[in-house]
Amino acid sequence: RDTEFLPKLAEGDSAVIVEVSDHDTDLLRYLGKLQLYPQTIIRIISIAPFDQLITVRVGLSDDATNDFVIGQKVASSILVSKVKED
C-alpha cells in the first residue's frame, strides 16, 4: 500500500492513518485528543490557501463535529495511505 505524509493529500481525499511520529510525547498527546490514531480513517475537508491549515474530519460521516484544524508541522508527522474512492 502506498503511503505519504498527510500534507500531500488534496481536498476531498480520504485516507487511513498508517503511523504518527512518536518522537514528541506532547505531539502524541495532542493527536490523541484529536482522535488521530493509526488505523483511523480521515477525510481532508479543506486546505487554507495562504497558511495551508488543513481541516481534517475523523471518520467518513458528514458530522462536522469531528472536524479539526491542524497545521503543516502536525500534518507532516502523520503518515497516511490514501483510500481509493469508488
Image: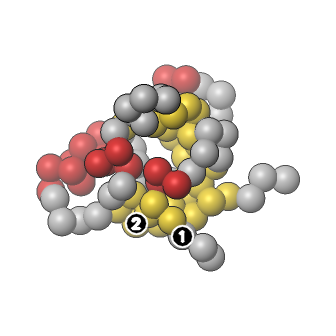
Q: Is residue 39 visible?
A: no
User: At label 1, which amino acid type do we have?
Assistant: Thr
Q: Are marks 1 and 2 in contact (CB under 8 Å)?
A: yes
Of labels 1 and 2, the one closer to you: 1
**Residue 86 left/right relative to 49:** right
Q: Secondary structure at mark 2?
A: strand
Where 49 falls versus 14 (above or below)? above
Q: Residue at x 21, y 50 (%)?
A: 27
Q: Which residue is located at x 40 percent, y 66 percent?
A: 19
Please state which amino acid type lies under the numbered disc 2: Glu
Give me the residue at 33% from left, 58% from top.
77
Q: Residue at x 24, y 43 (%)?
A: 30
Identity of the residue furthest to the right in this view: 86
Q: How is the image coloured?
A: secondary structure
Which label sits on residue 29?
none
Which residue is tagged 2?
19
Residue neighbourhood size for the residue with mark 1, other residues' Cα within 10 Å, grouped as few (<14), some (14–19), many (≥20): some
Where does the N terminus fall, quadrant-wise?
Answer: bottom right
Answer yes or no: is residue 44 visible.
yes
Where is residue 49 drawn, in percent x and y? Answer: 49, 29
